[in-house]
Amino acid sequence: MAKKNEVASISRRNFLAATGAATGLGVAAAVAPYPVWSEAREGGLNIHVGPGELDEYYGFWSGGQSGEVRVLGIPSMRELTRIPVFNYCGATGHGLTNETKRILGPDAPLNGDTHHPHPSFTDGTFDGKYLFINDKANTRVARIRLDVMKTDKIVNVPNVQAIHGMRPQKVPYTKYIFCNAEFRMPHPNDGSNMDDNSQYYTMFNAIDAESMEVAFQVIVDGNLDNTEADYSGKYAISTCYNSEEGFTLGETMRNERDWTVIFNIPRIEAAVKAKKFTTLGDSKVPVLDGRKGSKLTMYVPVPKSPHGINSTPDGKYVVANGKLSPTVTVIEWAKVDQWFAGKLKSERDVVVAEPELGLGPLHTAYDGRGNGYTTLFIDSQIAKWNIADAIRSYNGEKVNYIRQKLDVQYQPGHNHTSMGETKEADGKWLMVLCKFSKDRFLPCGPLHAENDQLIDISGDEMKLVHDGPAFAEPHDCEIVRRDIIKTKKIWTRDDPYFADTVAMAKKDGVVLEKDNKIIRDGKKVRVYMTSVAPNFGLNEIRVKKGDEVTVTITNLDQIEDVTHGFTLVNHGIAMEISPQQTSSVTFTADKPGVHWYYCQWFCHALHMEMRGRLFVEA
Ligand code: CUK
Ligand code: CUA
């Protein structure tokens, strides 16, 4: 114990010396720009990130049924920010401002069910540009710009219901976001044939990551659960838990084997180019038939209702997790090449191992040292197993491929290792997202938090080091090295996020960076003003009852962290205006009288005085 303390105090002293140098001498900051988290600790990694220290990783968490994305520091598990995506956010005005309404589209529902946050890739690793996230509830996919951590595009996927599994292409770069529509539905879905199962199907979808338009859709047999991309850029692979094409629970559990379906992307692209596709309804998206017998797909039978699907960081294998079978199925990509080249007889010939791990395997993560870490939902455990040994065992050798089983609290779903979804898996941290937390936290009524558990996997043994409560089922997360993410400190004036608003001001002859003006255009009133702590450019706005009022505010402050806000009392109006940002909101002035507006972000000693009056004449 004494020895442990000594180690801790030495590393602390080193840390203090380092910060002292950084703050004392301006030049030192170039070498160590911020106090760094120190890795050393006897018998494992250090999870303590002290005041003023910065985490080593960004964690991107799905916000589950809240419809948002959360950003955490790892290993501290401090919540750094929340990124509103499909939800309404009362702090930033996401869902309310004109800039965010343009992104959400007309009549967008303000709920979402997010599961799978995934950063964009270049050459098999994260490039820090975008984060993508699905909305199962309303069949959407969103893109978040990581430089400002704002949602910048949302696409409604047509002709399908419930986008669930989602992964970006890893190689050569994220050209497509692959995403599964989970539920089969009748086609056309216009009420004409609701009972005829033979008219039901679902589709695999590819979204162009730059334009965020759907590039193609592929009809499949069965349904689609999770999906994954390979490390050659040629394939995507999805799990199907309903090969029975049943509607009830009993029906979907009948078969001992369901399957994974592999999509041959070059062949699909060639078919699209050769115009060998149809379209559905009003949609122009190319639709291809990838049902059994198609040259575009391959169906690999795997036991039973598989769920998660995860490529190994060495690029050689992909693992389908059995869920209702105690096994996971290891598929070798090189053999998939052979099958598509007509060199293998059976689809099962691509399977190179099927290790038995325990009850309810859902998802597998990797350490880059040849081991898999599989969540066992029913056993409430993580099984650490060796991939090479599992293959040996499948080939008849007597080897034990299980390395360790660790209890987790309780019922884990996804798990993720640091950088583990890339070729740069570094084998330091494992995050396990447990669905139940029961006795782990102070009770807060019947609805319990999830429990996100941090496990040190740097040594031979897994060590549980932290419990992290999380609201409304995150499902999934990503752990990204911090040097990959490069964020802006303040907005730049030419940012596309508010370019449409800037263009509208230009039409009104307004220079946003200096003008404070009210423009009347029939029953429409456009108010332009600046903000500089602690002042709005206008303290009075006069309009008439029934006017449609658009308030556009440009924050001229250039100092990092001086965000202003605009809240109009009793109107449900509030928005964020960060340094050098322009934000706008439109509402109807339907209540005669005086209504105060104020800055709701504490920005200055005179922040309370940053306010003005809206006069609505009867
Ligand atoms: S899913 Cu939830 S535990 Cu939506 Cu990726 Cu597996
Ligand atoms: Cu501006 Cu508070």
Image (cartoon, helix red, strand yellow):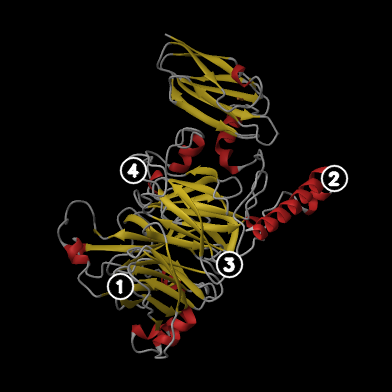
Mark nearer the N terminus (2 vs 4): 2
605 lies left or right of 363? right
**Looking at the image, can residue 212 be seen?**
no
Mark nearer the N terminus (3 vs 4): 4
Mark nearer the N terminus (2 vs 1): 2
595 lies left or right of 183? right
Q: Which residue is mark 2?
A: 25
Cα–Cα gap, marks 2 and 4: 51 Å
Q: Which residue is mark 4?
A: 447
The location of residue 512, given as percent across then percent down, is 64, 29
Which image quarter has ligand 1?
Answer: bottom left
Q: Which residue is mark 1?
A: 325
23 lies left or right of 617? right
Compared to residue 515, the image places residue 390 above or below, namely below
Compared to residue 235, the image places residue 105 above or below, namely above
Cα–Cα gap, marks 4 and 1: 30 Å
Residue 610 - label:
none
Q: Secondary structure at mark 2?
A: loop
Q: Secondary structure at mark 1?
A: loop
